[in-house]
Amino acid sequence: MLSRRHGCDFVSMTEPRHWLPWVKGLDAVINCAGIFTATRQQTFDRVHTDAPVALFQACAEAGITRVVQVSALGADVHAYSPFLRSKGRADAFLQMLPLKWMVLRPSLVVGKGGTSSHLMQQLARLPLIPIPGDGKQVIQPVHIEDVALALLHALEQEPACRVVAAVGPRRYTLLDWVAALRQQQDLAEARFCRLPLSLARLICLIGQGLHPLLQTDALDMLQAGSYSELQPFVELLGRMPQSPLHALASSAGESR
């Protein structure tokens, strides 16, 4: 059953009783709520932990047969990042409930119009590209269509309580990924300016109000890397994931 109700104020839905009228009669629930920049009203704890925990409790009380949590690669209750810790707490709570659940943890999601995708494309166009550290940070970007297909399969396949990392078919260093984005836009070979991490962190502190991705948290997650074993995601999709570059193919020409 597909609910066609209008949206709710997610951050205020922090008790199961708030969610029960919304989940009544549903067969499954997918929680995709997430923020990358916290504010006084929308904190990581409220958006990523308190509201989802209340939602999951309501699902259990209402007899929902399937719950899928869209988390983030690296999420853990003991993670170094407040963003990842808040996601990890909700993941851990869901796994304790007596229902059929799946936690999907995407790496860097690539899609036309996405904030991070647009920023990376613009960065790749610069004549001299600033890169934090040595540029050897490892990422495994995933096509947004594959994430959507994985969610569909999570609802259609035989329920199995598991955590699956949503990753693309190839691991890139940050240098390689930016170079690939530049090549896709038919630009000359990339020239990089490597920034000391201390300087990169200072830039994030100064610029965090200018762009949602200029965050020290984002820098820390980049340094830690974002990659995982591919096979579980292949099994969920039923095929190899497609290149994340395909998601930006049509927008490359438009951005020039």
Image: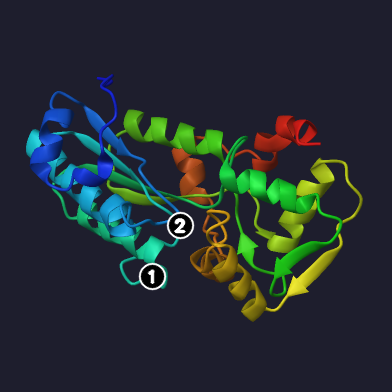
Which color scheme does this rendered protein use? rainbow
Q: Residue at x 75, y 65 (%)?
A: 130
- Residue name at image x 47 percent, y 32 percent: 149
- The extreme right residue here reads 188
Residue 122 is situated, as x and y percent measured from the top left of the image, at 73, 48
Q: State the image quarter where residue 174 is shown.
A: bottom right
Q: Which mark is residue 90?
A: none
From the image, which quarter does the C terminus lie in? top right
Seen in the picture, residue 156 relative to 221 is either above or below; the reply is above
Residue 69, how many percent across, how many down?
32, 45
Q: Quadrant of residue 117?
A: top right
The three-letter amino acid code for the residue at tag 1 is Ala
Disc with the residue nearer the chain's start (1 vs 2)? 2
**144 or 97: nearer the viewer:** 144
| Quadrant that contains the N terminus | top left
Q: Is residue 142 visible?
A: no
Which residue corresponds to the image point at 82% horizontal and 65% vertical from the top-left? 192
Residue 120 location (% of width, % of height): 68, 50
* Residue 73: assigned label: 2
Which secondary structure lies at badge 1?
loop
Circle 2 packing at 10 Å, graded few (<14), some (14-19), many (20+), is: many
Circle 1 residue = 79
Do we see residue 80 in this rendering? yes
* Identity, as a three-letter code, of the amino acid under mark 2: Leu
Mark 1–mark 2 Cα distance, whole angstroms, equals 11 Å
- Horizontal placement of 82 versus 256: left or right? left
Q: Residue at x 51, y 43 (%)?
A: 234
Up the image or down, 129 lies above or below 220; here it is above
Which SS class for mark 2?
Answer: loop
